[in-house]
Image: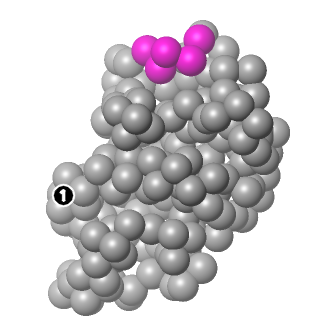
Amino acid sequence: DVGSEVGSEVGSGVGPGVGPGAGSGLGSGFGSVALDRAARPDHVDLFAIPLAEGASVDPRWWAIQVFSIGAMPRWVRGLFGVRRMLVPLIGLDPAPGDVFSVREVVGDEALIIAEDRHLDFWCAVGVDPASRLLRITTVVTLHGWRGRAYWAVVQFFHGPVVTSMLRRAVRAA
């Protein structure tokens, strides 16, 4: 069952156990372009899932599969709809339609970047061909009270949303 094989968070926040190679289970050489982009992140996590033999190892392809609105589970699309309605209450604009578009590919990672007045978000979708793992590394830097208020709510949904999106993409591939 693919659902039981999604890794849990490596870490949340900044401190021991977070960062390149720190307790990721991916070896001491683990790093991420997302981690390289944030000087002082407020949140870092990593989720990984095994890929079937013969599955694509193209990180851009996987980023598109995981973050495609049409491929997201219904309940995740519903949460995004609720988010779109609620963020104006704290003075934020709804996210643009291309918020989950791949901005660049660096090595084995496709990078999704969102920079806004309340937070900066870097999401690296990577594939390790040797271990056959698909991973998502998320790095968030918060700005001001809006960022803290937003993340205070979103942090509880982030892990289950990412896990569900990974499972769905791997099952559909």
Q: Is residue 109 above or below residue 173?
A: above
User: For numbered disc 1, what is the local secondary structure?
Assistant: helix
The residue that appears at 50% across and 75% down in the rendered structure is: 69
For the question of whether residue 99 can be seen, the reply is yes
Q: Is residue 102 above or below residue 171?
A: below
Quadrant into which the N terminus falls? top left
Tell me if 9 is positioned left or right of 152 in this view.
right
Q: Is residue 51 above or below residue 162?
A: above
The residue that appears at 62% across and 47% down in the rendered structure is: 125
Dominant SS of magenta comes to loop
Q: Position of residue 54 (x, y in %)?
A: 76, 36
What range is drawn magenta here?
A: 23-27
- Quarter-wise, where is residue 108 in the image? top right
Q: Position of residue 82 (x, y in %)?
A: 24, 81
Residue 28 or 80: which is nearer the viewer? 80
- Quarter-wise, where is residue 101 in the image? bottom right
Residue 148 or 47: which is nearer the viewer? 47
- Quarter-wise, where is residue 153 in the image? bottom left
Mark 1 neighbour class, 10 Å CA radius: few under 14, some 14 to 19, many 20 or more:
few
The amino acid at mark 1 is Ala
Residue receiving disc 1 = 152
Q: Position of residue 77 (x, y in %)?
A: 36, 75
Work out which residue is located at the far top of the displayed protein and give it.
28
For the question of whether residue 87 can be seen, the reply is no
Residue 124 or 131: which is nearer the viewer? 131
Tell me if 120 is positioned left or right of 86 in this view.
right
Numbered label tally: 1
Asked if residue 101 lies in the magenta stretch, the reply is no
Q: Position of residue 61 (x, y in %)?
A: 73, 57
